[in-house]
Amino acid sequence: MAVEKTFQEINERIKKGQAVVVTAEELVNMVKEKGVTRVTSEVDVVTTGTFGPMCSSGAFLSLGHSKPRIKMNKVWLNDVPAYSGIAAVDAFIGATEVPEDDPLNSVHPGEFRYGGGHVIQDLVARKKVLLKATGYGTDCYPRREIETEITIDDINEAILFNPRNAYQNYNCAVNLSTRTIYTYLGMLKANLANAHYSTSGQLSPLLKDPMFKTIGVGTRIFLGGGIGYVVWNGTQHFPGVNQDDNGQSYGHAGATLSVLGDLKQMSPRWLVGTSMLGYGATLTVGIGIPIPLLNEEICRYAAAGDDELYAPIMDYSDAFPNLNSSNLGYVSYAELKSGKITVNGKEVPTAPVSSYPRAREIAGTLKQWIQKGDFLLGEPVQLLPNADAGIKVNTLKG
């Protein structure tokens, strides 16, 4: 008889301390040993994790009113501009924003020392941040400028809101040209001298539930060391676009998530300001998602190991690879993690931009939270679009 469970049943087991929870890494070996049917009946929740640079991240900050009040028209945090066209004292700091006087025309354009991601990490670390703001003055907001130091505890609300995180799958980037290039996947040496990748493979959240059978609006997650939520599909959410006969994606990075959480609960260990040589500033984010084993189909997807999960190999020297770019084949995450792959007949050393040990730590932490009863599953009120949704990719003309 087929195994069928519900979110409610699993949450009741979590409350009673009876839930069986394993990491996605542990599940791979369990299924090989016991089979899908037995493991589905025995295991309630599988935890996942990823820790890597996620540019489409930022924070909404409600800074609080001064005396007299100011309607903030321009805002800077540690000299990094924040967007203030929201309300009088609300602002959004983006992870990739950089100071206006940063060396944009340095030897490597975009070699930023400090950006929005670093501001977010400093706030989470309870460090003092210099706030500067100007206003144009109104009857109800007469003040025209303010400069003061703040900490995250001095402001009313701090909400991490990341429009595009947790890429389902990412390219393995190489460089076929004769010059070194600088990308969001790091420095790619000329003539196929190295290859970089970013997905955590068998721990990667969206590779463990690729058809979005359990992940949707309202899913409760590990976010930046605290508890967060999936609030929508992420931008550039293209599940199932350009797949080969085996269902492997190429020429794009797949599905994404839009996530939100209370920044005041988070940790600088799991939100890390990052500077990418020749590219710019970003934020390295830790995300972990629990996947309830509601049935055998979900278990089968979640049990895929590194040797069954593939990334497309893309040449980043010909502008930026897009859906019309040709790929150089596929490579398994087992091969990527071995430290070398073969591309065009040449052995190429590999390196991750994301951290697998930290992804493993996230999955383990989430496992402990659930086992202790501190973390219940959030049943989605709406599942996210999957490969059957027929989403098409639009490109700008010009």
Image (spheres, grey):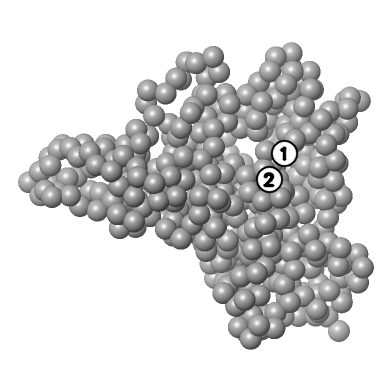
| Relative side of 130 to 55, left or right | left
Question: Residue 81, located in which quarter of the rendered image?
Answer: top left
SS for dot 2: loop
Seen from the viewer's position, the closer of residues 306 and 368 is: 368
* Residue drawn at x 54%, y 14% as measured from the top left: 107
- In x, y percent, where is residue 85? 29, 43
Say if residue 43 shows up in the picture. yes
Hey, what amino acid is under mark 2?
A: Ser
**Mark 2: few, some, or many residues within 10 Å (few <14, many ≥20)?**
many
Q: CA distance from mark 1 to mark 2?
A: 7 Å
* Amino acid type at mark 1: Pro
In the rendered view, does 154 fall on the left or right side of 38?
left
Q: Label for residue 209?
A: none
Residue 355 is marked as 2
Would residue 253 be visible to someone looking at this image? no
Instruction: Tell me residue 292's x, y (percent).
Output: 69, 71
Q: Residue at x 81, y 79 (%)?
A: 41
Crowd band around label 1 with a 10 angstrom C-alpha radius: few (<14), some (14–19), many (20+): some
Q: Position of residue 367 (x, y in %)?
A: 67, 68
- Relative image position of residue 75 (x, y in whole percent): 29, 38
**Above/below status of 344 relative to 386:** above
Report whether 107 appears left or right of 296: left
Q: Nearer the viewer, residue 251 or 292?
A: 292
Q: Where's the N terminus, which quadrant?
A: bottom right
Indicate which disc residue 352 carries.
Answer: 1
Q: Does 182 appear above or below 14?
A: above
Residue displayed at 54% across by 58% down: 225
Q: Measuring 81% from the left and 42% from the top, which residue is drawn there?
A: 337
Residues 311 and 340: in front is: 340
Q: Are marks 1 and 2 in contact (CB under 8 Å)?
A: yes
What is the count of numbered marks? 2
